[in-house]
Amino acid sequence: MSDRPTAPTVAALASAPLSVSAPGKPVSEILVVDDDPGCRNLLIRVFGAHGWQVIAAADGDEAIEKAQGKNIDVVVLDLLMPKRSGLDTLSALRSIDPQIEVIMVTGDATVGSAIQSMKLGAYDYITKPLQIDNLIRIVDRALEKRRLSRKVDELNDICRFKSELLDNMGHELRTPMNAILGYTALHLDRVYGEITPKQEQSLKRVEAAGNNLLEVINSILDNSKLSAGRMPVYLENFSLKELSREILDMMEILAQAKGLKLEWNMAEDLRLRSDKTKVKQIMVNLITNAIKFTRMGGVFIEAKQAPESGRVQIRVRDTGIGIKAEDIKLLFQEFRQLDVSSTREFGGTGLGLVISKKFAELLGGTIEVESVEGSGTVFTVALPLESAKEKDETATIFNMTSSCKPNKTLLAIDDDPEILNLLRDSLHGTGYGFAGALAGEEGIALARQIKPLAITLDVMMPRRDGWAVLQILKSDPELRSIPVIMVSLLDNRSLGYALGVTDYLIKPFKRVELLEKLNTIEGDRRSPASAPKDVSMDPFRGR
């Protein structure tokens, strides 16, 4: 709030020298609202001489009417007026345009009216008699704030448009990539005839490059959803210890391939209410990154509850190449690789850490990093034991159940509609029917309804991931005999077979491979010797 000026009267103000706007300066629109015609005309003259376009209103109702559909930058508003008070007018103007800057003017100032004005969003509160230099300075500052607010809106729009463009491009790229990989796989399987060893080698290179590109596309899609604020959050209660076991099962293969230790330490079983799939993805990204940049030693994970903070801290420490001090601030910039030579050696898209950070922030948490070049890096994730908000998107049954055929239907459970479309198209003309569901609960219900020949099941899904759905299927006497094929981006076959899956496919899957597995399942069903076997539901038995 401005100090009360010891200024000349309004009459003296009228004769004061006036400023003139600089050539080329954008014309700003000022709305003057005052029931005193002398004060109103004076402000029109002062602001007009300063190069601003002025609109005048004698009361609050007229001001609201003139503000409708106009691009008003700043309002100079009298507090005490008949009919509608200045405070009511302020509230109405801010509802028309929340970013409009309003300067309250009064000859009867009180602390209460000043506080109320600020609470309603006034930019400033000044008293009469007015002082021209002070008034012009305040209006200039208000116009600058208005200009910056518009610039922020423009940048937010650009960011949103960029995210939408990346999202659209990602979907447009993923469709032909699936076709490229699919037809490449068909050629490698000799569906279209024999190929020479040199052709096979070239096609395998195409397949490897295509899979790498598909991974980049999927990362871009996740990042664009996060940037555009379209990433849903699904809250559920889960054990961090149980989740860690699943993750270590997935990561052990990578660590063993490089001769690295992979150790987990947690003093107690911590339970979280959060998005389990996103917490898992954060940990998988960090551990994968640690293994990637570690040549000797190992990766060590620990979790503990931070004292009196209501948060859990998860630390991922490696003995890898470390990060230069000046490069740490660049870690979470999109598509940023710290060292081109490292990129060539270790690979990566530059999005894994960005997505992990955005996931953590989406769940109300943080990620911090400490590193010494040549000695290793520590990432610390702090997550609330209970995330505050949930953005839910109700999953629905995929509308392809019309093609169901008795005893020959494949039920696909996957939260990605593109995968369901691909599975459906892969079965076209084969004699197999298709049904799909976008979430575990709907998939289980559909399985009870149609009794499919087999079920394909994604691992990474919201609310109930594939492992949880698999456990329900295998513990239900009505469903346990239905063969389940896991279809996932992650290769975690050992856990799948331990839980009783019939087979395991890695995305992007090969059509021929899928049909071979269905033919085998159908042949086993016809064979009287085939009978369902009991499978222990403890994936960690023997540990």
Image (tube, rainbow, N blue to C red):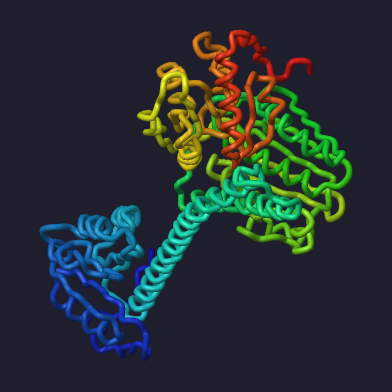
Which corner quadrant of the image does residue 55 belong to?
bottom left
Which corner quadrant of the image does residue 105 belong to?
bottom left
Front-lying residue, 453 or 119: 453
For this orientation, the residue located farthest to the front is 193
Give the answer, above or below, for where 480 lies relative to 7: above
Residue at position x 74%, y 40% in the image: 316
Please identify the quadrant where the C terminus is shown. Answer: top right
- x and y percent of residue 321 in the render? 83, 52
Q: Is residue 329 visible?
A: yes
Residue at position x 27%, y 87% in the image: 49
Residue at position x 53%, y 23% in the image: 454
Front-lying residue, 370 or 252: 252
Q: Is residue 459 visible?
A: no
Give the answer, above or below, for where 525 lies relative to 129: above
Please identify the quadrant where the N terminus is shown. Answer: bottom left
- x and y percent of residue 92 in the render? 22, 56
Front-lying residue, 87 or 275: 275
Q: Is residue 122 left or right of residue 442?
A: left
- x and y percent of residue 351 in the render? 63, 53
Front-lying residue, 350 or 21: 350
Residue at position x 74%, y 15% in the image: 541
- x and y percent of residue 422 in the render? 49, 41
Which corner quadrant of the image does residue 492 belong to?
top right
How many numbered marks are there?
0
Give the answer, above or below, for where 155 lies relative to 45: above
Q: Is residue 290 left or right of residue 390?
A: right
